[in-house]
Image (cartoon, rainbow, N blue to C red):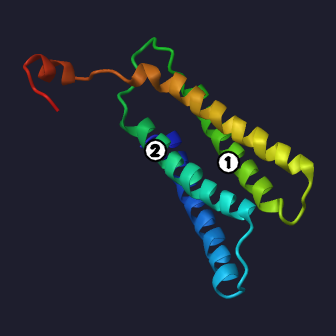
Amino acid sequence: MHKIVRYYIRASFVFLVAGSLLGIWMLYQKAIGGQYPDPEHVTAHTHLILVGSVMGMILGVAQWMFPRPQPGSRYSPDLAMAIFYLFVAATVARTLAEFALPFLPLSWLRVVAFVAGSAQIVAFALYAFNMWPRIRAVGSQFREARGEKF
C-alpha cells in the first residue's frame, strides 16, 4: 500500500472519529440538554462524515485500486500528494469555521467556510484530472473481445 493511500485512509478514520464525536455531542445537547443542535454544527458533522470520511476513503482506495500509471502519462505523484493536502486542509478549515460560527458569529468565518468548500471542489477536480490517465483497460479488453460481459 503506497504512502498516499495510507494517508487518505488514516485521514478518513480521523474524520470519522471527529465527526462521530461531534455527533455524540450534538445528541447529548438534544437528548439530555433539551436543546436542538445549531444548524452550523449539523453541517460540520455531516461534512466530516460524508466528505472527510467517506470521500477520503473513496479517494484513497481509488489511488490503491486503479491501474498504475503508464510511463509517460500525465499522472503526477507529486500532484496527487498536493491534492491530498489540499483536500485535508480544506476539510479541516471548513469544519472548524462551521463549528466556530455559533460561538463567534463573525462574517469572515462564513468566508472561510465558503473558500474552504470551494477548495474542496478544486481538490476533487484536480483529483479527477490527475487520475484520468489511470482509468484504462488492464486485461479486460481481452475478455470483452471474447464476448464476456460484466
Q: Quadrant of the C terminus?
A: top left
User: Which amino acid is tagged 1?
Assistant: Thr
Above or below residue 59? Residue 51 is below
- Quadrant for the N terminus, please: top left
Residue placed at 70% from the left, 80% from the top?
A: 29
Instruction: Give the residue drawn at x 90%, y 47%.
Output: 108
Give x and y (percent) for residue 2: 46, 40
Decide: is 12 above or below 65.
Answer: below
Image location (x, y in percent) of residue 100:
82, 61
Tell me where residue 71 appears, x and y as whole percent: 42, 14
Few, some or many residues within 10 Å of mark 1 (<14, 14–19, 20+): many
Picture quadrant of residue 27: bottom right
Q: Is residue 101 left or right of residue 70?
A: right
> Helix, strand, or loop for circle 2?
helix
Q: Height in image: 105 above or below 135?
A: below
Q: Position of residue 28 (x, y in %)?
A: 66, 82
Residue underneath mark 1: 91
The residue that disc 2 covers is: 58
Q: Quadrant of residue 20?
A: bottom right
Q: Does residue 135 appear to the left or right of 15 in the view shown?
A: left
Q: In the image, what residue type sits under mark 2?
A: Ile
Residue 70 left/right relative to 93: left
Seen as rendered, the residue at the extreme bottom is 32
**Real-space Cα separation, disc 2 to disc 1, in angstroms:** 15 Å
Near mark 2 (Cα within 10 A), the count class, few <14, some 14-19 or many ≥20, is some
